[in-house]
Amino acid sequence: MASLSNSLQLKHGLTSWCPGSSSLTRRLPSSSIRFRSFVVAASSFSNDNREFVIVGGGNAAGYAARTFVEHGMADGKLCIVSKEAYAPYERPALTKGYLFPLDKKPARLPGFHTCVGSGGERQTPEWYKEKGIEMIYEDPVTGIDTEKQTLTTNSGKLLKYGSLIIATGCTASRFPDKIGGNFPGVHYIRDVADADSLISSLEKAQKVVIVGGGYIGMEVAAAAVAWKLDTSIIFPENQLLQRLFTPSLAQRYEELYKEYGVKFLKGASIKNLEAGPDGRVAAVKLGDGSTVEADMVVIGIGAKPAVSPFEVVGLNNTVGGIQVDGLFRTSVPGIFAVGDVAAFPLKMYDRVARVEHVDHARRSAQHCVKSLLSAQTHTYDYLPYFYSRVFEYEGSPRKVWWQFFGDNVGETVEIGNFDPKIATFWIDSGKLKGVLLESGNAEEFKLLPELARNQPSIDKAKLEKASSVEEALEIAKASLQIV
């Protein structure tokens, strides 16, 4: 569940906005606005903790909460308002370990609450209580009054905030109801409830159709293989994960999936979903008039930033999301946005981007809170990072784990035979811009961000002659010494 909005072939999304000229950078420094004063009647509001309020209950909220605790500013001061029924958790698990069959040790809460994904403490509901953090569950925010510094929730609660962090993430893009997007047996996946519903269908299904050839499609298809189901993936592009993979790299992964029995319908459009006599989805009708039978359909066609009801703080119409500066400040003093919903300056590439990835959710939340609570004034300097891990269930003949760092621009050099390693290097104007590695070891994976961050000059001809992934990485590593 990851993307870089309008980026690379990952859709860059250049805009005319730049940190140096924006009014966002002319506001007061964070240290001068972090404690906005307000005088209220004690009984007017539903939240007791009003100094800092986080809206959203995903990864970013969990890591922000930890940072508030580390600075001694959570107890009696921090309130988190979430539409979910659970304390913040590591969302990537939902399309990976959570979907394993019940006999293959699937992930379950409380096992993957934040911040275990980065090696941190498991922040269970009890942890939030112990830290004095007020949690409001299953009550999404539906309104904001920036003048009065208040929020309204779905249940009618009126909440007060001094400083506000918007961490609402994204919502799944859906098929319209008129073409069957809401039939029973049609699934989208963004939260635990979605994943539980999907598992309930997997337990009964025989034929699964997955719409979308991106992260969701690849990860759910891998899970369906573990359930030993007839699995098909349908997507309009000519290859898997077109925003990142080269055609030859995509072909390698497609061949692996085919070995597991997965069928591909590439370059296909969908006219509508069809229901059976019981009202449940029964088939997918393609643009050419043919149909594909299905007991269940999983839609993984992307996501949209969850900006409502915060449009008033300022949106970016190019990459989507809420516009922020390098300290995650919006156009309204005292209001910040982090994670998937934030359109921020991608400093190292001098463009504005919106990144849908857990790594950015974690880092942006931490950077924002540190800036809010301390004298930190350096701007966020993010290195794009994406990964996927599939076929990791017990008994799988082969596990797949790749990592990518940097920018996928320029020419590519592919080294390795995918048995199991393969590496792809992106080179632009003689400089190494990005690198993807499949099945690397810890030391090799650790090298990737160093290469992408430094962008060393590299001998493309020499790299092309490398006889192995290991040799290619050594050539790339040696180029760092002459930067």
Image (cartoon, rainbow, N blue to C red):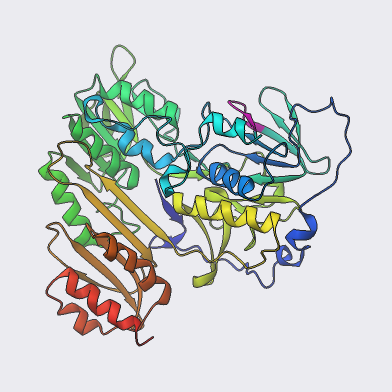
Q: Is residue 207 above or below residue 380?
A: above
User: Looking at this view, is 18 or 459 the one in front?
Assistant: 459
x and y percent of residue 382 in the render? Answer: 50, 63
Whether residue 218 sits left or right of residue 324 in the image: it is left
For the point 33% across and 64% down, which residue is it?
A: 446
| Residue placed furthest toward the top | 278
Whether residue 338 sits left or right of residue 189 in the image: it is right
The C terminus - image quarter: bottom left
Can residue 357 be seen here?
Answer: no
For the point 45% across and 49% down, which residue is it?
A: 358
For the point 54% across and 29% down, which residue is it?
A: 125
x and y percent of residue 361 in the render? Answer: 51, 50
User: Looking at this view, is 208 or 475 the one in front?
Assistant: 475
x and y percent of residue 413 in the render? Answer: 23, 73
Whether residue 325 sits left or right of residue 11 in the image: it is right
Specify start and end residues of the magenta stretch as a single range.
Answer: 134-141
154 part of magenta stretch: no
User: Looking at this view, is 176 or 368 the one in front?
Assistant: 368
Can residue 311 be seen here?
Answer: yes
For the point 88% across and 30% down, which residue is it?
A: 41
Which quadrant holds residue 421?
Answer: bottom left
x and y percent of residue 362 in the render? Answer: 51, 51
Total marks in image: 0
The N terminus - image quarter: top left
Q: Is residue 277 above or below residue 346?
A: above
Whether residue 214 sits left or right of residue 66 in the image: it is left
